[in-house]
Amino acid sequence: MKKIIFILIFAVIGFQFFTTEQVGAPDLPQQLSLASYSNSNGDLVLVNRDIALQNEPGNLATIPDDIAKNVIVNSEYFLEEQAIAPLKQLFDAAANDGIEHFIINSAYRSGKLQKQLFEQIGADYALPAGYSEHQTGLSIDIGSTVGKMENVAEGKWMEEHAAEFGYILRYPKHKVDITGIEYEPWHFRYIGLPHSVMMKEHDFVFEEYIAYLKEKQFYKMKLDNTTYFVHYTDNKTSVNTLESNNIKVSGDNVSGYIITSVLEEI
């Protein structure tokens, strides 16, 4: 009898969680002007073989060579500044799990460098200048010093846990038909929370996630003690959203904006 009651309670809770994302639009009392934002800037800009980067990154910072004890940084690499602190948290968490043999192999690439790489290795493993995520300053190639990422603990840990820190495995093996890029177990893209966790839970690649946002328009997610409200709009002038003092706006580099509001932090 107790087992049956537990199953029923679990089913009700699960249903409520599911319907939280499906209910009608909530009241959105706060008006936010989009006049100062660009559709082609932000952590959620989509760049692929069909969608070109419109703007060069404007907030690049050097990845510290001592970012973490379990990673080798043997060259000067750059990322957008907001992606570096989560990267350190990621490496520190991996170290706590006994994962010790990371190496950074690439991060931001200029258009000139991307052109050279494309000419060297071809279209299956690189994109032409202007169409590579590395030019956004939000992507990083992370390897292992003990083997290929698809075969070692570093790769397995990253695939399982990167989303907890705002990073996604950009080109998974089972989504080549969507991304158009062969499996790259070393290539991770920063998109921030809660987007990375939402993608992980739904097994989305970035293209699928943007399509999902356009269709659903909004969702709410609680991670630990923080509640996020994510809202998509194709309005170019303003948007109504939930009351919050912590709002981030990113263009999708296609036709709209993604507004991420932090509603509750304890």
Image (cartoon, rainbow, N blue to C red):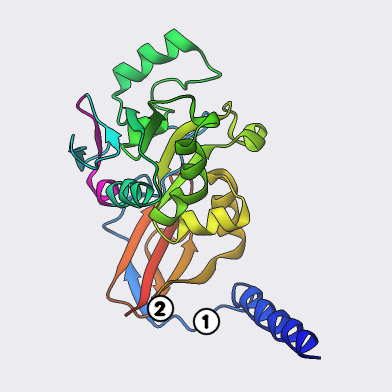
Label 1 neighbour load within 10 Å: few <14, some 14-19, many 20+ = few
Q: Is residue 145 above or below residue 170?
A: above
CA–CA distance in space, label 2 to label 1: 8 Å
Q: Is residue 114 above or below residue 153?
A: above
Q: Determine whether, in the image, residue 41 is placed left or right of residue 168.
A: left
Which residue occupies the foreground of this view, 151 or 104? 151
Q: Read off the magenta span.
A: 75-85
Name the residue located 32 percent from the left edge and 80 percent from the top edge.
266
Which residue type carries mark 1? Pro
Q: Which residue is mark 2?
A: 242
Q: Determine whether, in the image, residue 69 is placed left or right of residue 254.
A: left
Name the residue located 69 percent from the left edge and 78 percent from the top edge.
15
Instruction: Please give the label number shown on residue 26.
Output: 1
Q: Quadrant of residue 260?
A: bottom left
Image coordinates for residue 27, horizontal then vertical, percent: 48, 84
Q: Decide: marks 2, 1 in contact (CB < 8 A)? A: yes
Name the residue located 54 percent from the left edge and 30 percent from the top edge.
150
